[in-house]
Image (cartoon, helix red, strand yellow):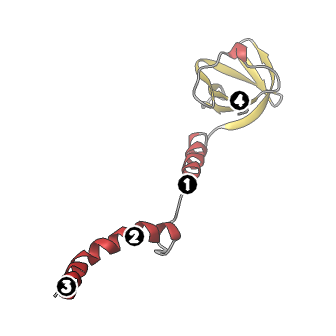
């Protein structure tokens, strides 16, 4: 009688036991359908899309309302957004010769977004 009782309870618990093993199957890759993606991969993908239309370069000079990047002069719009890669505001006065930047140009070739790339 004890065997019949325990057997009946085990059969009732079987779906719950299987469900409790599912996370382990996905982690091991037993399902084969769900790819494991890390947080850093997602953030890296996000960063690539965030700056997809940006150009990269090194500051070679700053003159008034313009900046020279890779020996090419670009005017900066008065409403341009200038930040570091963490979205902290940066003044044009804080940018110096030799620093790495990402920049976005409007249709007329003026910088409307400038990102100072600070080494971490």
Q: Earlier in the sequence, mark 2 or mark 3?
A: 3
User: Marks 2 and 1, how far apart in space?
Assistant: 19 Å
Residue 114 locus on image (x, y percent): 65, 27
Tag 1 secondary structure = loop
Residue drawn at the location 19% of the way across and 83% of the way down: 8
Residue where numbered disc 1 is placed: 38
Q: Residue furthest front?
A: 2
Total marks shown come to 4
Quadrant occupied by the N terminus: bottom left
Residue where numbered disc 2 is placed: 22
Residue 115 locus on image (x, y percent): 65, 29
User: Marks 4 and 2, how far apart in space?
Assistant: 43 Å
Query: Is 88 placed left or right of 3 in the picture?
Result: right
Q: Residue furthest left?
A: 1
> Badge 2: how crowded within 10 Å, few (<14), some, or many (20+)?
few
Residue where numbered disc 3 is placed: 2
Viewer-nearest of discs 2 and 3: 3
In depth, the one of 120 and 51 nearer the eye is: 120
Query: Is 44 placed left or right of 15 in the picture?
Result: right
Residue drawn at the location 49% of the way across and 75% of the way down: 30
Q: Quadrant of residue 91?
A: top right
In depth, the one of 100 and 30 nearer the eye is: 30
User: Marks 1 and 3, how far apart in space?
Assistant: 48 Å
Tag 4 secondary structure = loop
Q: Earlier in the sequence, mark 1 or mark 3?
A: 3
Residue 14 locus on image (x, y percent): 28, 78
Q: Quadrant of residue 10?
A: bottom left
Residue drawn at the location 59% of the way across and 43% of the way down: 47
Q: Can the viewer see residue 6 in this picture?
A: yes
Tag 3 secondary structure = helix
């Amino acid at each position: 009688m004890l065997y019949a009782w325990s057997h009946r309870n085990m059969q009732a618990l079987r779906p719950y036991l299987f469900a409790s093993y599912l996370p382990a199957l996905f982690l091991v890759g037993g399902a084969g359908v769900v790819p494991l993606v890390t947080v850093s991969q997602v953030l890296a993908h996000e960063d690539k899309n965030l700056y997809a239309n940006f150009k990269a370069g090194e500051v070679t000079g700053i003159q008034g309302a313009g900046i020279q990047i890779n020996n090419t002069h670009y005017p900066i719009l008065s409403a341009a957004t200038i930040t570091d890669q963490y979205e902290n505001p940066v003044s044009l006065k804080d940018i110096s010769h030799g620093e790495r930047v990402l920049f976005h140009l409007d249709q007329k070739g003026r910088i409307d977004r400038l990102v100072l790339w600070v080494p971490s």
